[in-house]
Amino acid sequence: METLINELKQTWDNPATLLVTALRVVVVYGVLLIFLQLSGRRVLGQMTPFDLLTLLLLSNVVQNAMLGSDNSLVGGLVGAMVLLLLNRLISRARAIRERFEGSPTVLISQGQILLDNLKRENVSQAELMTALREHGVENAAEVGIALLEADGTISVVPHKSGVIRQVRHVKSSRNR
């Protein structure tokens, strides 16, 4: 407890340290947000073990960029606080959220696979066919529309039914 009190005293003696830490966290958060958007929705929606490992290692790689040489408890808490505040602000800022989350992309329309959209969204035909089978559809010809949703899931509406049968549910920070 005494160590924490000493850290707090030193931090309040030099408030510039807190501001620099907060600024570094904001910069790294913004750059990572852009990088994640460039990597595509599928990385965020349906994580493979490789995606999860990449995100875990990414957090470790950028730790020093955010906190610099400040490995103190207070520095870590300031970094965590700024990250949580940024997340809260962005989740409430509709224009920013829509810019990064995007809108659904049509992958199949009236039984026709839209290869350009698959390529643009980095979804393989094998992944698409897996999603169709998860929805109880055997082939693309049976599909009225299939959408890559903003959260990375694939929704399928068969020709015969107007009801979306979504089998795979993804919990994300956006589901508040």
Image (cartoon, helix red, strand yellow):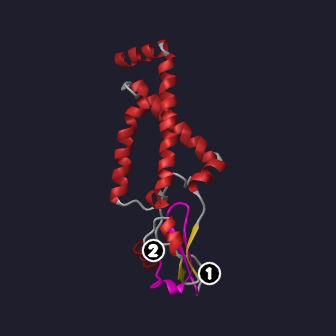
- For the residues carrying marks 1 and 2, which lies nearer the camera in this image? 2
Query: In the rendered image of this protein, does residue 154 appear above or below residue 101?
Result: below
The span shown in magenta is 135-159
Residue 128, numbered circle:
2
Asked if the stretch drawn in magenta spans residue 166, the answer is no
The reply to whether discs 1 and 2 touch (Cβ–Cβ < 8 Å) is: no
Question: Which residue is drawn at the image coordinates 55% and 37% (left, top)?
Answer: 85
How many other residues sit within 10 Å of disc 1, few (<14), some (14-19) or many (≥20)? few
Residue drawn at 46 percent across, 55 percent down:
39
Q: Residue 129 sits in which quadrant? A: bottom left
Q: Report x, y in % for residue 35.
A: 47, 48
- Foreground residue among 78 and 110: 110
Is residue 117 or residue 6 the one in the foreground?
A: 117
Badge 2 density bin: few <14, some 14–19, many ≥20, Cα 10 Å: many
**Mark 1 vs mark 2, CA separation in Å:** 20 Å
Which is more N-terminal, label 2 or label 1? Answer: 2
Q: Is residue 80 above or below residue 91?
A: above
Q: Could you tell me residue 111's position as x and y percent?
A: 55, 84
Q: Residue at x 54, y 82 (%)?
A: 112
Q: Amino acid at mark 1?
A: Gly
Above-or-below relation of 34 to 17 = below
Whether 153 is among the magenta residues is yes
Amino acid bearing label 2: Leu
- Mark count: 2
Q: Secondary structure at mark 2?
A: helix
> Which labelled disc corresponds to residue 162?
1
Q: Secondary structure at mark 1?
A: loop
